Amino acid sequence: MQTNGGGRSCSDGESAGLRQACASCKHQRKRCAEDCFLAKYFPAEKQGEFRAVQKVFGLSNLTKMLRANATEAARQRAARTLAWEAEWRDRDPADGCFREVAALRSENRLLRDHITALAQALTCQYPTLRRYRKTPISSPPSFVDQGNFSPFDDDDESNVLLQRMQ
């Protein structure tokens, strides 16, 4: 038996430089093997995240969901997503992450509407831009919709100028 720098003893062929047990093995109170599947996704410092995920999904389901992903990057993302969902379930046991997802979808919808309005405004400004450009432009960019939408109010003088140019 030998001792490592921290005063703990190592035996049974362990070297003093072995990694710490992952959050899963700590939770199960077992020694973490070198090929521990969950060690990559829930290292020792993420014990709180692991407990939340294990409480919501269970260890067997967690392992199945991670193994269902083909690539390592997809497994990392799945582990982060499951931890996020478990955190929200802990905060709000009834709805979980539903309210946050609904808020993000609403914000996404507003931003997409804003982009559409800007693209339509760019379409309205296209003839003016083409007139002042030194090199000719054959057609507007492909993302610009060819609709007749003006972001200006009817009584706005900018709208009057646009109508005169067309």
Image (cartoon, grey):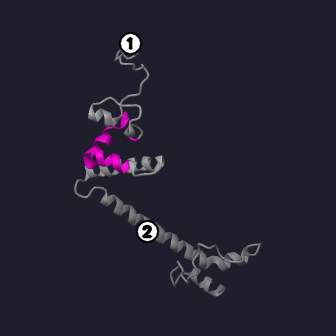
Q: What residue does disc 2 label?
A: 110
Q: For residue 2, which numbered disc appears in the image? A: 1
Q: CA distance from mark 1 to mark 2?
A: 63 Å
Q: Quadrant of residue 47?
A: top left
Q: Nearer the viewer, residue 141 or 121?
A: 141
Q: Main secondary structure of the magenta part?
A: helix
Query: Residue 134: x, y in percent?
Result: 77, 72
Q: Earlier in the sequence, mark 1 or mark 2?
A: 1
- What span is in magenta? 41-66
Q: Quadrant of residue 150?
A: bottom right
Amino acid type at image mark 2: Leu
Query: Residue 76: x, y in percent?
Result: 43, 46
Left or right: residue 27 compared with residue 19 = left
Q: For residue 77, which numbered disc appears in the image? A: none
Q: Nearer the viewer, residue 151 or 115?
A: 115
Left or right: residue 23 compared with residue 94 = right
Q: Secondary structure at mark 1?
A: strand
Q: Work out which quarter of the rendered image holds the C terminus and state it.
A: bottom right
Q: Work out which quarter of the rendered image holds the N terminus and state it.
A: top left
Query: Residue 160: x, y in percent?
Result: 59, 85
Does 154 appear above or below 45?
below
**Mark 1 neighbour class, 10 Å CA radius: few under 14, some 14 to 19, many 20 or more:** few
**Is residue 137 within the magenta segment?**
no
Which one is closest to the eye, mark 1 or mark 2? 1
Q: Nearer the viewer, residue 55 or 109?
A: 55
